[in-house]
Amino acid sequence: MTRYPQVRQLAAEAVGTFGLVFAGTGAVVIDAETGGRIGHVGIGLTFGLVIMVMIYAVGHVSGAHFNPAVTLAFAVGRHFPWPLVPRYWAAQLLGGVVASATLRGMFGETGGLGVTMPLGSAGRSFLLEIVLTFLLMFVITSVATDVRAVGQAAAIAIGGTIGLEALFAGPISGASMNPARSLAPALVSATWTHQWLYVAGPALGAVAGVLVYQFVRGWDAEAP
């Protein structure tokens, strides 16, 4: 892999994660700014839709991870080279931080910049983040690595999964499933309470998701 295509991949990951955090957490911020005019359903749909359009936009360039947990899981599942993992993480976090900083510049810290915080015990949200990310990664691995899946529908399947999980689990854990999505507003707003669970939970869930799908698929199935 030459240097310049890699730079384009990293730029795509940064832009895609910027879009995710800007639109997704932006919906939380604007909902707070306007007294709830977007609503929980609108926020959940925003997260799903922005992932869908960003996958269509740059999936062919970088693979459209936009999520350090997804990058880690793909590497564990041997679908992604380990040397690129820290570079993808850096690009994803950079894109998220720039998005959160942009929102802060426009709205201040309205809505806590969309920081994820558990409702109730941290342990419950930790387990919820593991399960949510497991299901998400199971779907991602299916549509992204199995030649028998309908590849053109990958963005719809992944965006739909994120929107669905945000709709039913968002009020409890925030339905982050993505360390970059949580760490970006936390860094910009200096909010550190329980942020560990939004790193460890998605990482564990994503690795479990890719491994379980590989077992379900069968190790002899052809992968791209």
Image: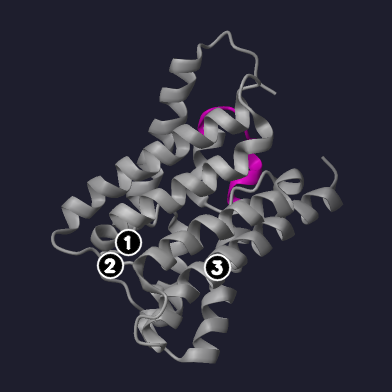
Residue 139 lies in the magenta-colored region:
no
Residue that numbered label 2 is attached to: 117
Q: Is residue 147 above or below residue 168?
A: above
In the rendered image, the residue lying farthest to the left is 121
Report if the CB atoms under discs 3 and 1 are less than 8 Å apart.
Answer: no
Q: Estimate the spatial distance between the alpha carbons at disc 3 and disc 2, rounded to whole Å.
A: 17 Å
Q: Is residue 87 visible?
A: no
Q: In this orientation, which residue lies closer to the viewer: 35 or 51?
A: 35
Residue at coordinates 36% horizontally, 82% vertically from top-left? Answer: 111
Q: Which residues are magenta?
A: 76-86
Which of the two labelled residues, at mark 3 and mark 2, occupies the earlier sequence position?
A: 3
Q: Estimate the spatial distance between the alpha carbons at disc 2 and disc 1, rounded to whole Å.
A: 6 Å
Q: Estimate the spatial distance between the alpha carbons at disc 3 and disc 1, rounded to whole Å.
A: 16 Å
Helix, strand or loop status at disc 2: loop
Q: Is residue 138 visible?
A: yes
Name the side, left or right, on which 119 lies relative to 150. left
Name the side, left or right, on which 65 lies relative to 104. right
Residue type at tag 1? Gly
As drawn, the label of residue 96 is: 3
Q: Residue 6: x, y in percent?
A: 78, 49
Residue type at tag 2? Met
Residue at coordinates 57% horizontally, 74% vertically from top-left? Answer: 99
Report if the CB atoms under discs 2 and 1 are less than 8 Å apart.
Answer: yes
Name the side, left or right, on which 201 lies relative to 96. left
Q: Residue 106: x, y in percent?
A: 54, 90
Q: Quadrant of residue 75?
A: top right
Residue that numbered label 1 is attached to: 174
Residue type at tag 3? Gly
Q: Quadrant of residue 146?
A: top right
Residue at coordinates 45% horizontally, 91% vertically from top-left? Answer: 108
Q: Is residue 112 above or below residue 141?
A: below
Q: Residue 62: x, y in percent?
A: 71, 47
